Image (tube, rainbow, N blue to C red):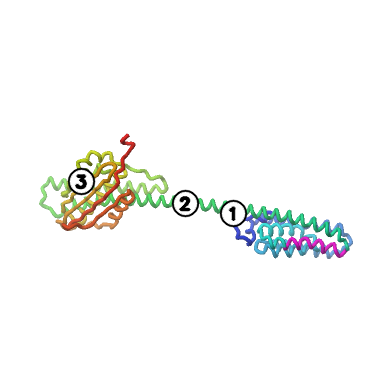
Amino acid sequence: MTSAAGPGPAPRGAGPPRPGRAREAAVLGGAALVGAVSLGLAATSAAGAPWWRWVLDALVGVGALALLTRRDRFPAAVAAVIVLASTWCSSVLGATVVAVVALASTRRWRPVAAVGALFVASTVVDDVPHGAFARAGEQAVLVAAVYAALVGLGAYLGSRRDLVAALRGRAEATEREQRARVEQAQVAERARIAREMHDVLAHRVSLVAMGSGVLAFRPDLPEQERVAAATAVRDNANLALAELRQVLGVLRQGDAPVPDAPQPTLADVGRLVAEARALGDDVRLDVAAGTRDAVAALPAPTGRDAYRIVQEGLTNARKHAPGAAVRVEVGGSPGGLLTVEVRNGPATRPPSGVVGSGTGLVGAAERARLAGGRLDHGPDAAGGYRLRAVLPWEVDEERDG
């Protein structure tokens, strides 16, 4: 019956899972009703039997109903006991049907066959002692057919239960995979935002630190240069705050899509160098003659990566080698490789005191790797430092078209 269906998958041979309380009450109520009707019909046809026989029959029926509550854990044993009780008691008819269907839903065919033989034999035990051999044979065939129908129903319900459990498991697995993909995308997006925040803020803060250092250690600066340095400190501090607010605003959006703000590209490196020069850095930008005109056609992702790598190189030079001469060299051609190199000499002033996070070069190397290129960095023979990135320069076909 419906006892074969359950809320989740069950291992082969372990019996069906526990049904819900309402379903269980309906199953037991139906079995009790069938048993009561069967007992009433038996009592009517055997009016001369003593009353206590029917009382005992009813008590056995109640016990069979109580035993049905254990059919999920011991389907074969419960079915065997109830089938044996049905040999002499009429009130267990409904319980017998439920027990046989529950056993068949497990599709353990050896216990099913054994209980079936017991089920058929119960009719022979009832008729043979009275000499009704022909009737016993007919009853055995009829009971075997009824038992086969119950087994078919139980097997169908067991298959349906397993199918529902498999579909539910597949749906849950799909949901878990979807949640994992969403979480991975969120982690990747947060990492991208963190990398952009580091690149931008580290650059701005290093400019502020350098400008404030100039004001602190050069009290003899002419008024015009002092005002220019103070203005640069103020402007870079305001830009750092504005960019920080923008990033924090994006992070507060939670799961909302993250809009991509306009990002600087390699064509904006000149402005980056000009900002550094405004604060007194000795920075020179050299763009190869064949590269200068093609930079504007550089694909935006490649141009942004190259810009951030140059920015990281200038920031590191400002923090670790203040006062050193810095050279930025850019070369390459469309369809080939783009090379970006930042070299600085040894420091000529005390360090600025800005503490680095230690992740800037790691992030720059990751940028180059994701773009299909590579990043090399390390001290050079002159006591300075060299950072060199090589990125593939793919041709932007849409722009060329």
Q: Earlier in the sequence, mark 3 or mark 2?
A: 2
Q: Residue 116 colored magenta? A: yes
Residue at position x 34%, y 36% in the image: 398
Judged from the image, the secondary structure of the residue bearing numbered disc 3 is helix
Judged from the image, the secondary structure of the residue bearing numbered disc 2 is helix
Q: CA distance from mark 1 to mark 2?
A: 21 Å
Q: CA distance from mark 3 to mark 2?
A: 44 Å
- Does residue 145 sit above or below 392 in this rendering? below
Amino acid at pointer 1 = Ala
Residue at position x 29%, y 52% in the image: 374
The residue under label 3 is 273
Disc 3 crowd, CA 10 A, few/some/many (<14, 14-19, 20+): many
The residue under label 1 is 165
Q: Which residues are magenta?
A: 114-130
Q: Earlier in the sequence, mark 1 or mark 2?
A: 1
Tell me, for residue 4, which label it has, or none: none
Report whether 194 appears left or right of 53: left
x and y percentages locating residue 352 in the rendered image? 20, 56
Magenta: main secondary structure equals helix
Report whether 222 appears left or right of 191: left
Report whether 90 appears left or right of 226: right
x and y percentages locating residue 327 in the rendered image? 18, 49
Disc 2 crowd, CA 10 A, few/some/many (<14, 14-19, 20+): few
The residue under label 2 is 179
x and y percentages locating residue 183 in the rendered image? 43, 52
Q: Earlier in the sequence, mark 3 or mark 1?
A: 1
x and y percentages locating residue 249 in the rendered image? 35, 47
Label pair 1/2, CB-CB below 8 angstroms: no
Amino acid at pointer 2 = Arg
Disc 1 crowd, CA 10 A, few/some/many (<14, 14-19, 20+): some
